[in-house]
Image (tube, helix red, strand yellow):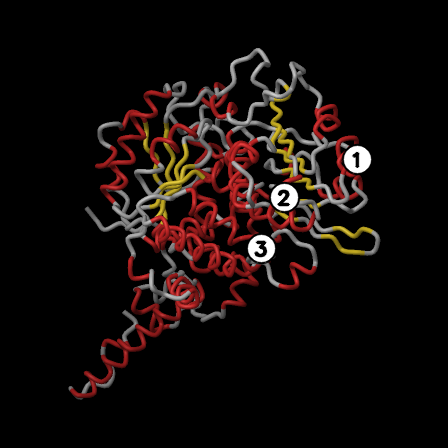
Amino acid sequence: MPTRQLTTTSGDFCLSNSPDVRKHLGTYGLTPPAVESFDVQAQRCLRLLATKTTPIEKFQYLVHLKATNVHLFYRLLSQNIKELTPLIYTPTVGEACVRWHEIWTQPEGMYLSFSDRGNLRQILDNWPHEVEITVLTDGSRILGLGDLGVNGMGIPVGKLSLYTACAGIRPEATLPLTLDLGTNNKALREDPLYMGSRVPKVTPEEEKEFLDELMVALTDKWPNIVIQFEDFKNPFPALERYQNTYSMFNDDVQGTGAVIVGGFINAVKASGVPVKDHKAIFLGAGSAGVGVAKQIVEFFKKEGLTEEEARRKFWFVDSNGLVTLDRGDKLADHKVYFARDDNNGRQYQSLARLIDYVQPTILMGLSTIGGAFNKEILQKMAKLNNHPVIFPLSNPSSKSECTFEEAVLNTEGRCLFASGSPFPSMEYNGKLLTPGQGNNMYVFPGIGLGAILSKATSVTQDMIYASAESLSTSLNKQEVADGWLYPDIRRIRDVSVVVTRGVIRAAQQNGVDRASELRNLSDEELDAYIVESMYDPFKDGEQLGEEVANLVAQTNQSNDVNGITNGVAHSHL
């Protein structure tokens, strides 16, 4: 069999390569002769991007760029992270997943089907690279878009691009992985272009058996691999089953919780309300909402509350109203922890009435109900609080419970705001206001890199909480002065260093780290080690150029010794 190389890991045809590098790589003559600076390359890319009229067209161009020139893609992304992230991940990736069966052009990961069970380990041998981290999904709950089957591959692909851009995990060390376990999306199953198995979703027991085999196969193939679960309809069984045995975490539950806690810590400080007096209503009682609330419980506990006191700070609302123990329906297991038993038999279906009853300081939205925080709701929160905490966290932006502008106008500019999707800044009373975005990319790259560098045997709850706490401390003086809840996303590499350090320290405190050589490093030394470990798309080509220059010099010296002045080093072959 011929040696295979995935195009997604090749930067061999980059126009920044010198003639000597091109000769070394065997690409001399296969590209235009000019040697271009990074700035010129970026200028061409941005001009091309500007010619695309829709986000999905821009997404497709960036996919093509990554496949043909991976280092240029990451240079462009790192210099334009704020502008390009919405194009490679939320919200554009949502449309990409819906249309994946229509726009797919090339492989960007692995697909493992239920019919492959018994052979998963053997199939993994087809992947030609050493893997440090994988993101896997079964596509059963993609963002707020429902069951998309193997169309969900856009999520692992996009997520791992952010692991590389934000935390410097090498592109070739990442594995996007989609599990083809059937889909209950009848329209997709009947679509002639759908690329997955045309069968209903397997049972939970069948999925458990499949995942058991997969986890063993992944860790046998790559013993130090970090495994991140994403967009499973019910993420809790796998999380509870594997979190103490494997280096794994679920970003929907734990990452979302951590990033919201990071902003929440700063919002609580800015609100002027003592921690013990805060009360939160959550619209949406799915896995993400419960995951967020459980992380906030950890914060309340660290601030001196008992677990019971912390748990009682939350009122959850689902499609049937306030989640209570006496509502008359059977609650999903994950809802029971926060179900109320102090409602005196009264049930609340109306969010407005519940706000009047609870008088909350915090309103969180993870419902995927666009516009649920309407004018009446927002004005009630503003009447109750000097600085109401308003976090509409649903993705994509069309599903957000309110926009930044709506929150500002209906709270007289007094709200402490963070959303799941990006919203533009706005002027209010002569002041430029910038919304916070509780984007998981603030924490999951650092969680992943911290687990990789510490060689963690598991990803503990303390490691997840450390990512949140570290995020809350990562703002610079100007960001704090401007009242921001999150740091500038353009500093994401610096933020990821802080988060990674916190995760490593927590792994060490929990005794799950195998990289014992890091334990005696000071924080400054550990930060330097983290930075040194990061892939840098600007330096990769330079390092190759230096290596080739050394080889050329050595060849020239050898040729001079032998009286040869125009040998292989100067050949165009």
Front disc: 2 or 3: 2
- Which is nearer the eye, 459 or 75? 459
- The spot of residue 92 in percent (x, y) is 57, 41
Element type at mark 2: helix
Q: Describe residue 8's horizontal placement relative to residue 88 as left or right.
A: left
Looking at the image, which residue is at 75% across and 31% down? 377
In the image, residue 464 sits, relative to residue 290, either above or below, namely below
Q: Are marks 3 and 1 in contact (CB under 8 Å)?
A: no
Q: For label 1, count other residues whose C-alpha is less than 10 Å away and answer few (under 14), some (14-19) or many (20+).
A: some
How far apart marks 2 and 1 lie (CA) works out to 23 Å
Q: Residue furthest left?
A: 562
Q: Amino acid at mark 1?
A: Gln
Q: Is residue 318 visible?
A: yes
Front disc: 3 or 1: 1
The first of marks 2 and 3 along the sequence is 2
Q: Amino acid at mark 3?
A: Ile
Which residue is identified by label 3?
489
- The spot of residue 229 in percent (x, y) is 41, 37
How far apart marks 2 and 3 lie (CA) works out to 27 Å
Q: Residue furthest right?
A: 429
The first of marks 2 and 1 along the sequence is 2
In the image, residue 526 sits, relative to residue 212, either above or below, namely below
Which residue is identified by label 1?
379
The first of marks 3 and 1 along the sequence is 1
Residue 275: assigned label? 2
Element type at mark 3: helix
Question: Dividing the picture into quarters, in which one does residue 376 lie?
Answer: top right
